[in-house]
Amino acid sequence: KQEVTQIPAALSVPEGENLVLNCSFTDSAIYNLQWFRQDPGKGLTSLLLIQSSQREQTSGRLNASLDKSSGRSTLYIAASQPGDSATYLCAVIRSNQFYFGTGTSLTVIP
Amino acid sequence: NAGVMQNPRHLVRRRGQEARLRCSPMKGHSHVYWYRQLPEEGLKFMVYLQKENIIDESGMPKERFSAEFPKEGPSILRIQQVVRGDSAAYFCASSTGQENQPQHFGDGTRLSIL
């Protein structure tokens, strides 16, 4: 059974700092991995989708990497801003089924 | 270009009543997924549907829960005889069904059971 773990569960950083969020999964037989952000009381906003054949994806200040052999993905956020405060979720995807981690709650302090 | 639309945003029911949650997928999407997010827990997959077909309902409780995605109209998640433990946020996502395409999520329905 696929288990997805995100560490840390919560993180507070001062504005401008670079940070890394971690996601690990137990079954490397995945198709893709997707990172989302969730704002309080809202749904999920897709940030980056990494296909299983890829090692990383970049969008603006965000960079996500995928290492299937070690069962890990990281989300790197450069020059963090208060507007980045949210919960970040990773999901591993296999056969159209998503397995979510419990998320990292990020607070960026102005 | 509307995204995934869920309604109602908030739903309050008393124990024993029925709850109906609706989801209209993004335009061009024919695949719908329902997830439940319990307090302090991650999102858990419930069911995956295409038009008029249930593809995978392995995450759906065997009793009281059902889902449909008719040829016309939104997908419906139905919970009969609700209990306190059904209180959660229920999210719907849609996709084209192709493996390299992301799922897009709605804002969810927050169900509260009194």
Image (cartoon, rainbow, N blue to C red):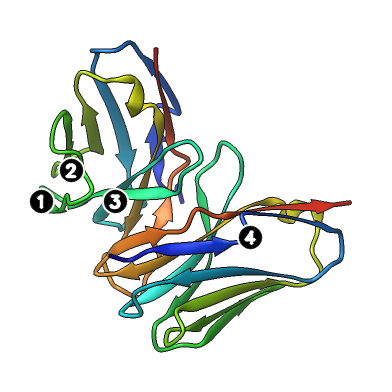
Q: Residue B94 or A80: which is nearer the viewer? A: A80
Query: Which chain is home to disc 2?
Result: B
Asked whether, in this view, residue A103 is left or right of residue A52, the answer is right
Same subunit, labels 1 and 2: the answer reads yes
Asked whether, in this view, residue A45 is left or right of residue B11, the answer is right
Query: Which chain is home to disc 3?
Result: B
| Label 1 vs 2, first from the N-terminus | 1
Residue pictured at 38% horizontal, 75% vertical: A32
Q: Are marks 4 and 2 in contact (CB under 8 Å)?
A: no
Q: Mark 4 points at which residue?
A: A8
The relative height of residue A30 versus residue B45 in the rendered view (above or below) is below
Q: Residue A72 or B53: which is nearer the viewer? A: A72
Q: Name the residue under label 3.
A: B33
The relative height of residue B108 versus residue A26 in the rendered view (above or below) is above
| Residue B37 visible in the shown view | yes
| Label 2 vs 3, first from the N-terminus | 3
Asked whether, in this view, residue B56 is left or right of residue A47, the answer is left
Q: Find numbered disc 4 in the image and state the secondary structure of the residue it sits on.
A: loop
Dot label at residue B69: 2
| Residue B96 visible in the shown view | no
